[in-house]
Image (cartoon, rainbow, N blue to C red):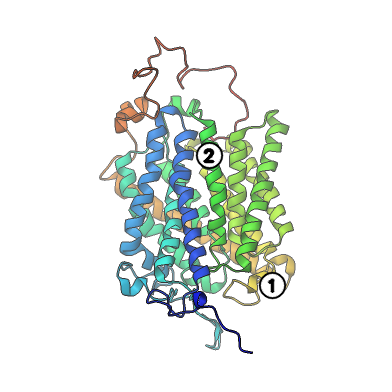
Amino acid sequence: MASVVPVAYQGNTSLAVADWLNKGDNAWQMVSATLVGLQSVPGLVILYGSIVKKKWAVNSAFMALYAFAAVWICWVTWAYKMSFGDKLLPFWGKAGPALGQKFLIKQAELPETTEYFHNGGVETAMVTPYYPMASMVYFQCVFAAITLILLGGSLLGRMNFKAWMVFVPLWLTFSYTVGAFSLWGGGFLFHWGVIDYSGGYVIHLSSGIAGFVAAYWVGPRSTKDRERFPPNNVLLMLAGAGLLWMGWAGFNGGDPYSANIDSSMAVLNTNICAATSLLVWTCLDVIFFKKPSVIGAVQGMITGLVCITPGAGLVQGWAAITMGILSGSIPWFTMMIIHKRWTLLQKVDDTLGVFHTHAVAGFLGGATTGLFAEPELCALFLPVTNSRGAIYRGVGGVQFLKQLAGAAFIIGWNIVATSIICLVIKTMIPLRMSEEQLTIGDDAVHGEEAYALWGDGEKYDSSKHGWYSDDTHHSKVATGVTQNV
């Protein structure tokens, strides 16, 4: 007896339901995109606004909010097709708008992703998910936006906001699109077989390196801020961190472009690695500083999430635990030990330590993916058949070397592109705030304060109120705090 497909699951039930549309995949892709968007707004807006000194709360949160909005307009106007459109160069797509309905309502496709054998035969067909281009544009946009926001974490507390307004579209155009097309959109690293499941290189390595380079060109915070930079609201910081963690289900779970078994593996591994990393970082704080730091726990959570990202759906659960152990210890070591002994790292004022939490952890994740990528899981996702990590022998050793080479390209491009962008902006707009703005903070820059009221409509006055300001030294401040100051 022939089975009958229920009407609700058939195509052509209305003009808005095409034969190729998979409602479940489309729903998951839009939910995933929204989860990633929530990581930025309000997630990182809250985290940035609360992890910094009180006088920079508004400025830090606004930098994140502005970047999110600016990326949206740039993305649909020209940057999406530079990242996922037709090839212009081996590392860059052709610019063009993603705004017309003829483009947005057709079935999604990434035109340069067909993988060919050396003899010209098709190895893996073009990526064509079962939902419209509008869902793909939405999903990829929130990834681009969070990359700029993560980069901005290196520049909090001193970058001229007007310079930031120019920096965001320039860096998106001349740096992010290159990494995205090269590794995801069908560029030379994609076809060579470099693995970046969900952005360990495209997002985290690039934002960490670019943030560090931009911090060099912008210059440091004021001396007083570098000496003492306590978070203004630790509990609110944890709320932002929680949104970041839970939102990572969409970050890694949406990258198979389908609600499939690989997506489930990615979400599970993401949580395993993040939890392991947080625990390892906290244990190291306790062992070496005698106190568990909640800021340190957040840093460990982030390094775990970053480390698993390039291999989330490609490694087994035991490998996710191993990657969590490494991501909770190696970035801790670079931040707490090497940073304090290496002159270059001390000279560059990376406000939130994005170099350690994203560049180091992203590189670590890409390298360990080259070790632990499991062949059967790779076959579920990767365009290059027979891919595997080094521990599975065969071509795995070559895969590990490819991962290192891919990282080298991303690092090199971001150093050069970010430097050029900063130098160009510097000829028109000062990259760093004035000394008066650096001294006063939000009130001087925006005419607004995060915590303006003290009692019945009156502003804080140190001569009248007993509560301390964030410039006051207190003997009870925890030692060993892992926030980079």
Give neighbour class at mark 2: few <14, some 14-19, many 20+ (Cα, 10 Å). some
Mark 1 and mark 2: span between their CA atoms? 37 Å
Q: Amino acid at mark 1?
A: Glu
Q: Which residue is mark 1?
A: 376
* In the foreground, 361 or 75: 75
* In the foreground, 411 or 457: 457
Left or right, 58 with reference to 316: left
Give neighbour class at mark 1: few <14, some 14-19, many 20+ (Cα, 10 Å). few
What residue is shown at x 47% (from left), y 50% (from top)? 38
Upstream in sequence: badge 1 or badge 2: 2
Decide if residue 354 is in sight here: yes
What residue is shown at x 34% (from left), y 49% (from top)? 167
Q: Which residue is mark 2?
A: 239
User: Looking at the picture, how far across and down is residue 374, in whole percent?
Assistant: 69, 67
Q: Amino acid at mark 2?
A: Ala
Q: Considering only vertical position in the picture, is 208 above or below 465?
A: below
